[in-house]
Image: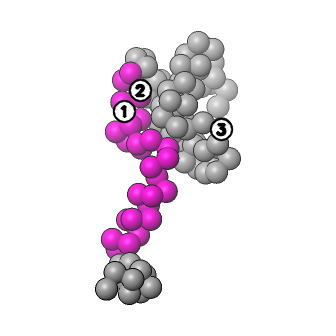
Amino acid sequence: MSSIENNISSVDFEMIRSVLDDAGYDASVLVEDQCLFDTAALLVTKLFLSGVDSRSALAAKLECQLGRAGTHRHRLSLSRYAIQGFPLESQANKS
């Protein structure tokens, strides 16, 4: 980890943090779902280290790969229903 820290200046680190914040990956996500926050932070950091140094390009790639932070919980629950079907009580209410 220290080798990564040595390759990123404080200005670049702040840009990475602002990209994460603007996409909704802020302190509240860190508290709610640390794995999701870590995944987003790792993605943006790896992209930056691989040469993507434009703020807009980082934001676009984050949006493409993971989407905005607030959309994950809803999308995951819908994926579950696509596989398992809606619970019986939900199906009964639709009839």
Is residue 42 visible to the viewer in this orientation of the structure? no
- Amino acid of disc 2: Leu
> Label 3: which residue?
27
Question: What's under tag 1, amino acid-wise?
Answer: Lys
Number of numbered callouts drawn? 3
Q: Using the rendered image of the protein, determine whether residue 30 is visible from the camera's viewpoint.
A: yes
Graded by Cα atoms within 10 Å as few (under 14), some (14 to 19) or many (20 or more), the crowding at tag 1 reads some
Residues drawn in magenta: 56-83
Q: Toward the viewer: 40 or 91? A: 91
Residue 37 in picture, x, y percent from top left: 57, 43
Residue name at image x 44 percent, y 41 percent: 68
Q: Which residue is mark 1?
A: 61
Q: Residues within 10 Å of mark 3 (few under 14, many from 20)?
A: few
User: Which residue is drawn at the image coordinates 53% and 19% (left, top)?
Assistant: 15
Q: CA distance from mark 3 to mark 2?
A: 19 Å
Amino acid type at circle 3 is: Ala
- Point out the frontmost of discs 3 and 2: 3
27 is higher (above) or lower (below) than 49? below
